[in-house]
Amino acid sequence: MRIAVPAETQGAETRVAATPETVRKFIGLGAEVVVEKGAGTASGISDAEYEAAGAKIAASAAEALAGAEIVLKVRRPGEAEIAGLPTGALVVGIMDPYGSEPQVDALAKANVAAFAMEFMPRITRAQVMDVLSSQANLAGYRAVVDAAAEYGRALPMMMTAAGTVPAAKIFIMGVGVAGLQAIATARRMGAIVTATDVRPATKEQVESLGAKFLAVEDDEFKQAQTAGGYAKEMSKEYQAKQAELTASHIAKQDIVITTALIPGRPAPKLISAAMVESMKAGSVIVDLAVERGGNCELAKPGETVATANGVKIVGHLNVPGRLPATSSSLYAKNLFAFVETLIDKKERKLAVNWDDELVKATCLTRDGAVIHPNFAPKA
């Protein structure tokens, strides 16, 4: 059983899909692990560390992939990578399939079984495999750190002989995993924190972290959560009411961090240009949804926009990748926990149970076809 860990090629990806810790665990299950030279460099992991863990170092991606039964990735393989994938291999990573149907079709035509880790169901046994949570947690933390770096003032209240420094006011929009970590981090740094979300269950979570909850709590709000725990898309009427409530609140904030995403859809627009114009000079907006179109109307992917009224709008791409060592460590553990379920420990070989609920939820392609119900061709 051969496992390949090629270097990431998409964009400026700094993460890696396996660490020396998970390499050791895979070898303990009977696998041979081959890591492409330099794959872990951006995450602070040297080839020597992989070798010490028992991995073989391949000089190229082609050499790493040759004969692999399992391919571990952070991002979906690019066109050149797909051409080098061994027929029948299991390819496990974040596939980002929405809006990328041609790339998913290409994986199917390559006759590989592609698994989208972001589709892992939110059930108890899969918590340790939840890549969205592990990476969003770090993104929420990093968003506050990035905001503090751009904000030209201290965050906590300070009483000094020279005078009192007021605490910064931070508003978190969207209270999923990223939002909750942003709240916790901002509170630890001494800020006054408020937060909003359309899901009623988040109110108690927000208040338990010492922040104040802000939302239009009408009948629609009480039903605004899917069975999977995600936010529903709200009606235009509700969005208008919520926008009116938040508009006056945003004008008083020093930092706003937005994290709102709806699976399979563009990010909802939460901050209009008019709201940005109402903010004080020196204020900061960090848009964690910028890769999905952004929650802020003026955010630009990969850029920090400075507005005419002195507001900075931060649109970093791949925010978890701004903490590559930590994010790789957690991501690699997520992948190991899932791949371990695909291996027969007694026989020490690959043995996929295609009827397993985790496999059925995450498998995009198999036997030359797109099989996931969200993307399979309509009959």
Image (cartoon, rainbow, N blue to C red):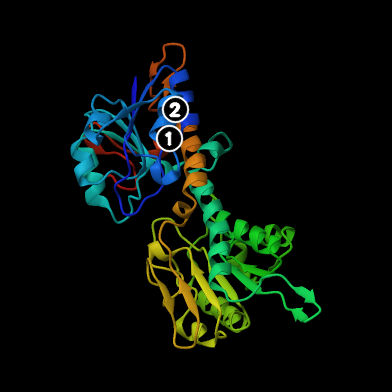
Q: Residues within 10 Å of mark 1 (few under 14, many from 20)?
A: many
Query: Which residue lies at the image location 48% right of the left edge and 77% below the top edge?
Result: 312
Mark-to-mark CA distance, 1 and 2: 6 Å
At mark 2, the secondary structure is helix
**Of the pair 84 and 194, the residue shown nearer to us:** 84
Q: Is residue 379 visible?
A: no
**Of the pair 89 and 152, the residue shown nearer to us:** 152
Query: Which residue lies at the image location 24% right of the left edge and 31% below the top edge?
Result: 367
Residue type, label 2: Val
Q: Which residue is mark 2?
A: 23
Query: Which residue lies at the image location 30% right of the left edge and 47% below the top edge?
Result: 375
* Residue 138, numbered label: none
- Quadrant position of the N terminus in the picture: top left
- Quadrant position of the C terminus in the picture: top left
**Of the pair 371 and 259, the residue shown nearer to us:** 259
At mark 1, the secondary structure is loop
Does residue 293 sit above or below 60 in this rendering?
A: below
CB under 8 Å between callouts 1 and 2?
yes
Residue type, label 1: Ala
Q: Is residue 93 left or right of residue 336?
A: left
